[in-house]
């Protein structure tokens, strides 16, 4: 694992935590694809990614990530994190609830030149919806 590859995990999380789309985009190659599997979102350009991350910060103005681990070797790997926030703004089809959430997830990344060429985020949207009071807790 190279130093550049190891630091991409920290840079990715820190970029999201700045709430600055330019810093998030700086982690990505110009042709990067950013997919959020839980939301069914595929962003194929920097402009689409900018809109995606900005929308997340509107719905969850205190959105933040805590890096819990990473395993990056060569040009691929994983970045494990916990995502936390409070639902204070409207999310498409979901008016603000004012409730907080915390969910674990992972980003599967492909790298090129110390930047992310492709990222796929996996996390449990149903868990978030339960914490926001939108879905009932599963019965035992």
Image: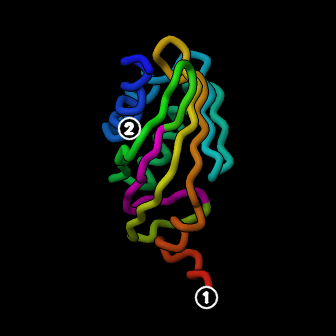
Q: Secondary structure at mark 1?
A: loop
- Start and end of the magenta stretch? 79-92
Which of the 4 quarters of the picture holds residue 32?
A: top right
Asked whether 57 or 66 is in front, the reply is 66
Q: Position of residue 120 (x, y in %)?
A: 61, 38
Whether residue 82 is in magenta: the answer is yes
**On-image quarter of the N terminus:** top left
Classify 60 as above or below 13.
Answer: below
Q: Which mark is residue 140?
A: 1
Whether residue 53 is in magenta: the answer is no
**On-image quarter of the C terminus:** bottom right
| Picture residue at 60% right of the left edge, 44% below the top | 36
Q: Secondary structure at mark 2?
A: helix
Q: How many marks?
A: 2
Closer mark to the observer between disc 2 and disc 1 = 1
Q: How is the image coloured?
A: rainbow
Would residue 72 appear left or right of 66 to someone viewing this image?
Answer: right
Q: Position of residue 28 (x, y in %)?
A: 50, 22
| Picture residue at 39% right of the left edge, 70% below the top | 99
Which of the 4 quarters of the picture holds residue 102?
A: bottom left
Q: Position of residue 45 (x, y in %)?
A: 61, 25
Label 1 crowd (10 A; few <14 / some 14-19 / many >=20): few
Label 2 crowd (10 A; few <14 / some 14-19 / many >=20): some
Which residue position is annotated with label 2? 13
Classify 5 as above or below 123.
Answer: above
Asked whether 61 or 76 is in front, the reply is 76
Q: Position of residue 127 (x, y in %)?
A: 54, 67
Residue 48 in view: no
Classify 112 as above or below 86.
Answer: above
Would residue 100 appear left or right of 37 to someone viewing this image?
Answer: left
| Alpha-carbon span between mark 2 and mark 1 | 35 Å
């Amino acid at each position: 694992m190279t130093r550049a590859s190891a630091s991409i995990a920290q840079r990715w999380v820190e970029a999201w935590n700045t709430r600055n789309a330019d810093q998030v985009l700086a982690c990505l190659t110009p042709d990067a694809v950013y997919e959020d599997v839980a939301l069914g979102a595929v962003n194929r350009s920097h402009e689409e990614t900018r809109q995606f991350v900005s929308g997340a910060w509107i719905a969850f103005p205190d959105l933040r990530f805590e890096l819990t681990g990473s395993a990056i070797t060569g040009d691929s790997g994983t970045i494990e994190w916990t995502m936390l926030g409070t639902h204070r703004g409207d999310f498409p089809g979901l008016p603000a609830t004012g409730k907080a959430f915390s969910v674990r997830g992972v980003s599967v990344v492909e790298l090129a030149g110390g930047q992310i060429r492709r990222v796929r985020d996996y996390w449990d949207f149903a868990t978030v919806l339960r914490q926001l009071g939108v879905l009932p807790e599963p019965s035992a």
